[in-house]
Image: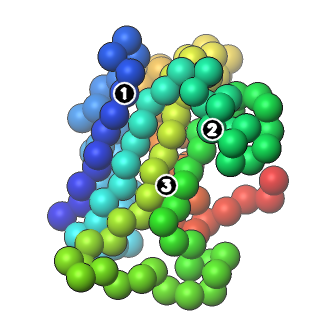
Amino acid sequence: MITVLFQTESHYPVNRKKVKQAIVDALAPQVHRDAEVSVSIVGDRRMKQLNRDFRKIDSTTDVLSFGLNDPIAKNIPFAAVPDDVLRLGDIVISYPQAVKEAGEENKMVDDKVIELVLHGLNHLMGIHHPE
């Protein structure tokens, strides 16, 4: 079973069911055990703070991911835990940035949120891109 823990600030209307299903659809073919991922939808002020605290960049961004383990970067497998649940980590999305980018790309906001979540999920799975 794939568990998606979802948190959003109350004034950001995100289709939780659609986001969760996109994560399950992306993970199911790759992960053959119980897994868990967390998604948080935040505002620009919180995203800027996270970006500053963890990346030393004093501006907002659209998506951040915080993996509990990165097998590619560390060249080690994911750690086994007593309950055998693969806890991938956290994905944080800036709702205002998603709205802005959706408008620029002529996309629905929920579709842009899903695109950003899947981008963050790739990072949690050890798939990275050049900065």
Question: What's under tag 3, amino acid-wise?
Answer: Leu
In the picture provided, is 43 more to the left or to the right than 49? left
Q: Secondary structure at mark 1?
A: strand
Q: Identify the residue under disc 2.
A: 50
In front: label 3 or label 1: 1
Estimate the x, y position of residue 80 in percent, counting from the top left. 35, 84
Work out which quarter of the rendered image holds the N terminus and state it: bottom left
In the rendered image, is residue 25 in sight?
no
Find residue 34 and report its horizontal and vertical position in percent.
23, 70
Query: Residue at position x 38%, y 21% from top?
Result: 9
The vertical placement of 122 against 112, above or below, is below
The residue under the point 33% across, 16% down is 10
Cα gap from disc 3 to disc 1, whole angstroms: 17 Å
**How many numbered marks does the figure carry?**
3
For discs 2 and 3, the disc positioned in front in the rendered view: 2
Q: Vertically, is 130 above or below 116? A: below
For numbered disc 3, what is the local secondary structure? helix
**Crowd tier of the residue under label 1, counting other residues whose Cα lies within 10 Å: few below 14, some 14–19, many 20 or above:** some
In primary-sequence order, the first of circles 2 and 1 is 1
Task: Classify 10 Å Cα crowding around label 3: few (below 14), some (14-19), many (20 and above).
Answer: many
Per the rendering, the mark at residue 8 is 1
The amino acid pointed to by label 2 is Leu
Instruction: Give SS at disc 2.
Output: helix
In this rendering, is residue 123 above or below 112?
Answer: below
- Residue ID at (37%, 12%): 11
The tag earlier along the polypeptide, 3 or 1, is 1
Label ID, residue 121: 3
